[in-house]
Amino acid sequence: MTDLVLNAQKPLLNRLCGALALTAALAAPSLAHADVLLEGATVALLTGTSAAAEPHLAGAIVEDRTDAFSFSSAHGTVSGSIQSRVVRAIDGTVDFYWRVTSDAGSADDIGSFRLGQLFTSEYRVNWRNDGLGDKAPANAHRFSGVMSGDINFNFQRMNDAGGLTGLGADQSSYFMFLDTDATAYDFSGLMDVADMGHTHISGLFSTFAPTVGAVPEPGSLALAGLALSLLPRRRRRG
C-alpha cells in the first residue's frame, strides 16, 4: 500500500523537485558589480549595480533610439518597445544599454530579451539599479562556439504560487548593459524579445554593437542567417 501511495505521488514529487531546483538556481549568489560573462555561462543578476558602485560606468549618452515591436502570442498580441543606448564611459570605452517596455494591453509576459552578433574581447553584464525601470532580469546567458556573441537576458522568475512570471503588461525593465573595452561601435547587432516559452518571438531589429580591429570570421557572420542562436527557425508570427 505504501509503495502504491509513493508511486501515485511521484509526478507531484518530480514537479516539486523541479520547482525547488529552479528556486535554488534563481537564488544563487548574484553579481554586486558587472562581471565577466564567459562562453556558455549563466550568471544571476539579482542586485544590479550603479555608477556609484562602479564609477567607470559613468559617461555621456552618444546614441539613443527606440524600436516598437508587436507579435502574436498564445493569448493575443504582445507589444511594446526596446530602447537602445550607447554610452561613452569616462574611461573612453563604449558601453551598450537596453531597456524593454511591455504595453499595458500585452496579452502575455515577455520571457527574454535576446541579443546577437555582439563581438568584443570581454563581456561584462548587469543592470542599472540607479535608473528607470521596475523589473530586473533574473540572469544573463551567453552562448558558446560560433554563437559566442549571443546573449539572453532572462526575466523569468518563480512567483509565490509556484508559477513562472516574466516582464508583464505595463512593466518596463531596468537598463540592462554590456560593459566592454571597445572604443568604437556600429549598428551591426541584432535583438528581439520572446514569450515565456520562446514559442512566439518578435521580429529581428538591428542594434548598436562594439567594433574591434578584426573582422569576425565567416562562421560568426553566419549568425545573421541563423537569425540569432536564440531564435528558432520555426518561429511563429501573427
Image: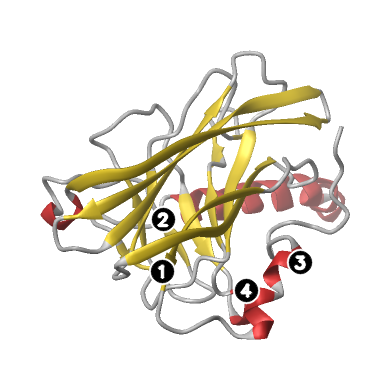
Q: Are marks 3 and 1 in contact (CB under 8 Å)?
A: no
Depth check, mark 2 against mark 3: the one in front is 3
Q: How crowded is mark 4: few (under 14 residues within 10 Å), some or many (20 or more)?
A: many
Q: How many numbered marks have been drawn onto this rendered protein structure?
A: 4
Camera-side residue of 137 and 86 = 86
Q: Where is residue 126 in the image (x, y as percent from the top left)?
A: 35, 53
Q: How crowded is mark 2: few (under 14 residues within 10 Å), some or many (20 or more)?
A: many
The numbered mark at residue 77 is: none
In the rendered image, which residue does mark 4 sit on?
147
Tell me how far mark 1 sits from mark 2, CA to CA. Answer: 11 Å
Depth check, mark 4 against mark 3: the one in front is 3
Helix or strand or loop: what does disc 1 sit on?
loop
Q: What residue type is labelled 2?
A: Ala
Q: Where is residue 37 in the image (x, y as percent from the top left)?
A: 41, 69
Q: Which amino acid does label 3 sit on?
A: Leu
Tell me how far mark 3 sits from mark 1, CA to CA. Answer: 22 Å
Tell me how far mark 4 sits from mark 2, CA to CA. Answer: 20 Å
Q: Are marks 4 and 3 in contact (CB under 8 Å)?
A: yes
Q: How crowded is mark 1: few (under 14 residues within 10 Å), some or many (20 or more)?
A: many
Camera-side residue of 4 and 202 = 202
In the rendered image, which residue does mark 1 sit on?
37
Q: Which of marks 3 and 1 is nearer the N terminus?
A: 1
Quadrant of residue 52 within the rendered picture: top left
In the rendered image, which residue does mark 2 sit on?
44
In the rendered image, which residue does mark 3 sit on?
226
